[in-house]
Image: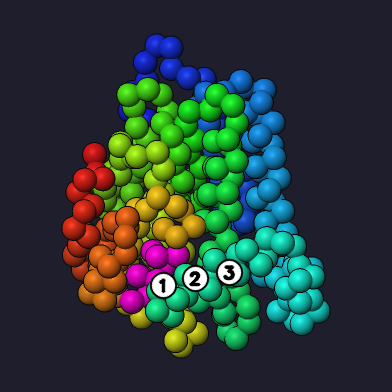
């Protein structure tokens, strides 16, 4: 959950909305701007999420991705977003040294990058509305933060404790930056759903959760998934090598490790 510290008199107007899409709930918190203009932009952002679901869902036989996987379309015949996302996914695969993949059981499946990409795209569109000073978009627990909720305040995100349901493992602050994303991959909510790209089977790992903090949710989501599949030691070592990336890793034995710069983001 993203929230500012306690508000003050004269704080920017907040416009909020929640929408079920992509099999989860997306919540929006937009601060500042003319409310009617913000609500119109929110309607467009929500429509964009539903469009992304229609284009990329592997559960819809008529989606562009499903038709592409069956050979009924080529990339040029798909919505332009497909080429954009596949190029981003190919970059994620290179940077992760193959630990992030776009195939599942031999079929094209870029959904591991779509939710973060779609949430980030929606947040940036909302931040472009005149007068908006802060945006928080939460897509199923992965959050893109832009700007600030009000002058002198920063967005804060609570990271759920995977070992102690209802508790927090950490609170991440966006103080001092204009853009910050927080993404978590793990087994606490959805069980063993993260695939090891080398085997095509659920990843065998000593981790229960990896939370990545980075400027962009597109990449934070990918890096959390890749690090989880790698396991604690290899995942932590790789995350330390990435610029502008911090992370919190938690094992099934409740061992907690973090990257060297994470402490500066907690509060």
Q: Residue 129 location in percent, x, y?
A: 60, 31
For this view, does 50 lie left or right of residue 27?
right
In magenta, the rendered stretch is 221-230
Residue contact at pointers 2 and 3, CB within 8 angstroms = yes
Q: Main secondary structure of the magenta part?
A: helix
Whether residue 175 is situated above or below residue 228 in the rendered picture = above
- Counting from the top left corner in percent of width and height, residue 261 is at 21, 53
Instruction: Please check the rendered image and state whether residue 226 is part of the magenta-colored stretch, yes or no.
Output: yes
Q: In percent of the image, x 60 and y 41: which residue is there?
A: 125
Q: Judging from the image, what secondary structure is the residue with disc 3 in?
A: helix
Up the image or down, 203 lies above or below 161; here it is below
| Residue at the extreme top of the image, as rendered | 9
- How many numbered circles does the render carry? 3
Q: Which comes before the other along the chain, label 3 or label 1?
A: 3
User: Would you place residue 143 above or below residue 156 in this image?
Assistant: below
Label at residue 87: 3
Residue 202 image-quadrant placement: bottom left
Residue 91's disc number? 2
Nearest the eye: 213 or 190? 213
Q: Is residue 238 magenta?
A: no
Q: CA distance from mark 2 to mark 3?
A: 6 Å
> Which residue is found at the position 30% from the left and 37% from the top?
176
- Mark 2 burial class by Cα count in 10 Å: few <14, some 14-19, many 20+: some
- Label disc, if present, on residue 95 of the rendered structure: 1
């Amino acid at each position: 959950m993203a929230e500012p510290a306690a508000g003050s008199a004269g704080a920017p107007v907040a416009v909020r909305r929640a929408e079920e899409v992509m099999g989860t709930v997306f919540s929006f918190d937009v601060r500042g701007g003319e409310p009617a203009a913000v609500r119109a932009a929110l309607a467009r952002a929500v429509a964009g999420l539903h469009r992304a679901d229609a284009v990329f869902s592997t559960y819809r036989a008529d989606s562009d991705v499903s038709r592409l996987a069956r050979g009924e379309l080529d990339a040029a015949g798909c919505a332009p977003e497909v080429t954009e996302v596949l190029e981003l996914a190919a970059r994620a695969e290179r940077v992760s040294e193959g630990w992030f993949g776009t195939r599942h059981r031999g079929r094209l499946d870029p959904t591991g990058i779509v939710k973060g990409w779609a949430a980030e795209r929606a947040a940036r569109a909302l931040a472009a509305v005149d007068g908006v000073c802060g945006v928080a978009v939460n897509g199923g627990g992965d959050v893109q933060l832009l700007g600030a909720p009000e002058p002198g305040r920063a967005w804060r995100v609570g990271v759920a404790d995977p070992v102690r349901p209802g508790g927090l493992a950490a609170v991440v602050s966006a103080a001092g930056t204009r853009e910050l994303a927080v993404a978590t991959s793990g087994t606490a909510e959805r069980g063993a759903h993260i695939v090891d790209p080398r085997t095509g089977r659920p990843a065998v790992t000593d981790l229960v959760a990896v939370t990545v903090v980075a400027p962009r949710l597109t990449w934070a989501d990918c890096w959390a998934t890749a690090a989880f599949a790698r396991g604690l030691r290899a995942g932590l070592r790789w995350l330390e090598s990435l610029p502008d990336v911090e992370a919190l890793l938690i094992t099934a034995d409740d061992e907690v490790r973090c990257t060297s710069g994470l402490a500066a983001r907690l509060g």
